[in-house]
Image (cartoon, rainbow, N blue to C red):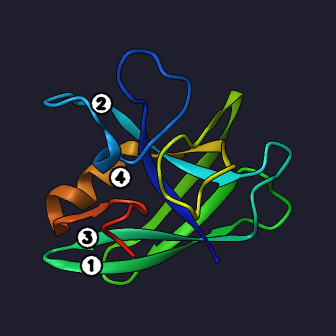
């Protein structure tokens, strides 16, 4: 099953995305996002693994695409609730330019965004729950 990845843009306008741990400029910080990866012509698949933290535990959730939808996904987390995410089309598909062989040659085909950010923020505050996505540290 494919995963939702957490990626950032590297410093100095390089065109593409990397994992935060692959940033090469010391003390550089970048705003990242969750992305669905694939070839330039790919569409989102039916399910994605979406890593999260619940309290102090690492958990794997599953984002399941709604029937007859290309862009909306549902994630149910026991004892917390249901989250809706939107796989936002991108005007330019950004290539992965880092060193991870598993992503080499792939592009960010969609940005994965919470449909109801307030509900997600509430879950963070009330349950110490947050999504982290896939990175070299979450395998």
First of labels 4, 1 by sequence position? 1
* Residue at left offset 80%, top offset 56%: 69
Residue 108 position in % (x across, y down): 63, 43
The total number of labels drawn is 4
The vertical placement of 66 against 12, above or below, is below
> To which residue does mark 4 refer?
119
- Whether residue 106 sits left or right of residue 56 in the image: it is right
For disc 2, the marked residue is 30
**Alpha carbon separation for disc pair 2 and 4:** 25 Å
Mark earlier in primary sequence (3, 1): 3
Upstream in the sequence, badge 2 or badge 1?
Answer: 2
Q: Which one is in front, 59 or 32?
A: 32
Q: Residue at x 29, y 30 (%)?
A: 30
* Residue that carries the numbered disc 1 in the rendered image: 58
Query: Nearer the N terminus, badge 2 or badge 4?
Result: 2
- Which of the 4 image quadrants contains residue 60? bottom left
Q: Where residue 102 sits in the image (x, y, percent)?
A: 58, 64
**Number of the front mark, 2 or 4:** 2
Q: Is residue 103 visible?
A: yes
Callout 3–callout 1 Cβ contact below 8 Å? yes
Tell me if mark 3 has few (under 14), some (14-19) or many (20+) residues whose alpha carbon lies within 10 angstroms of its own. some
> Which of the marked residues, 3 or 4, is nearer the chain's N terminus?
3
Q: Residue furthest top?
A: 12
């Amino acid at each position: 099953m494919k995963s939702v990845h957490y990626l950032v843009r590297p410093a100095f306008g390089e065109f593409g995305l990397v994992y935060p741990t692959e940033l090469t400029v010391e003390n550089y910080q970048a705003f990242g996002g969750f992305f669905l990866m694939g070839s330039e012509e790919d569409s989102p698949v039916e399910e994605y693994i979406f890593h999260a933290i619940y309290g102090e535990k690492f958990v794997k959730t599953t984002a399941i695409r709604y029937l007859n939808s290309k862009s909306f996904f549902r994630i149910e987390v026991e004892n917390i609730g249901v989250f809706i995410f939107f796989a936002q089309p991108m005007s330019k598909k950004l290539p992965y330019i880092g060193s991870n062989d598993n992503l080499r040659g792939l592009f960010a085909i969609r940005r994965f965004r919470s449909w109801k950010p307030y509900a997600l923020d509430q879950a963070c505050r009330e349950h110490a729950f947050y999504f982290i996505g896939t990175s070299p540290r979450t395998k």
